Image (cartoon, rainbow, N blue to C red):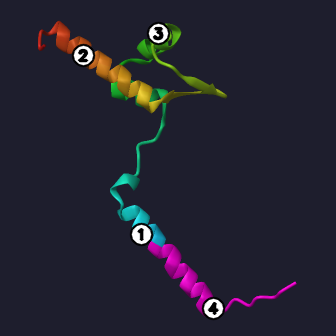
């Protein structure tokens, strides 16, 4: 078995390399912090401007997919955005904007 000694200077170099890599990753535009993927009911209600009862109805009618973990219901952020776009399109059609 070969023994290898690590010096304090080795650790400093490693630290600098790690910091450099982190800064490089953060500087790239593709690595921007993305919105959270899973939303709770109150977040969905705010996004869609709906009441808790309307959200319940949407779940019952399977209009919006959800996952229940314990007593907490989570919604896929992408699916909520799609529903928001559908609501916006319906509203514009009703108001004759298209």
- As measured in the structure, the alpha-carbon distance from the residue carrying label 1 to the one carrying label 3 is 46 Å
- The disc, 4 or 3, on the residue closer to the chain's N-terminal end is 4
Residue annotated with mark 4: 8
How crowded is the residue under tag 4: few (<14 C-alpha within 10 Å), some, or many (20+)? few
Question: What's the residue at 63%, 91% (across, down)?
Answer: 8
> Which residue is identified by label 2?
89
Which residues lie in the magenta part? 1-20
The residue lying furthest to the left in this view is 97
Q: Closer to the N terminus: mark 2 or mark 1? A: 1
Quadrant where the C terminus sits is top left
**How far is the residue under mark 2 from the one under mark 1?**
41 Å
Cα distance between the residues tagged 2 and 3: 20 Å
Q: What residue does disc 3 label?
A: 57
Q: Secondary structure at mark 4?
A: helix
What is the CA distance from the residue labelled 4 to the residue labelled 2? 62 Å
| Residue 50 coordinates in the image, percent (x, y) | 36, 19
Mark 1 = which residue?
23
Q: Earlier in the sequence, mark 2 or mark 3?
A: 3
Q: Residue at x 43, y 25 (%)?
A: 79
Give the main secondary structure of the magenta stretch.
helix
**How far across and how far down the image is residue 69, in percent?**
64, 29
Mark 2: secondary structure:
helix
Circle nearer the viewer, 4 or 3: 4
Label 3 residue SS: helix
Q: Quadrant of the N terminus?
A: bottom right
Residue at image point 74% right, 90% down: 5
């Amino acid at each position: 078995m070969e023994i290898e000694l690590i010096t304090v200077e080795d650790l400093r170099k490693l630290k600098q390399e790690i910091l450099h890599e982190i800064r490089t990753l953060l500087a790239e535009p593709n690595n921007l912090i993305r919105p959270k993927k899973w939303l709770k009911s109150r977040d969905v209600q705010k996004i869609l401007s709906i009441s808790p009862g309307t959200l319940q109805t949407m779940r019952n009618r399977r209009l919006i997919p959800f996952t229940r973990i314990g007593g907490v219901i989570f919604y896929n952020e992408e699916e909520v955005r799609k529903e928001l776009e559908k609501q916006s399109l319906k509203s514009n059609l009703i108001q004759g904007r298209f």
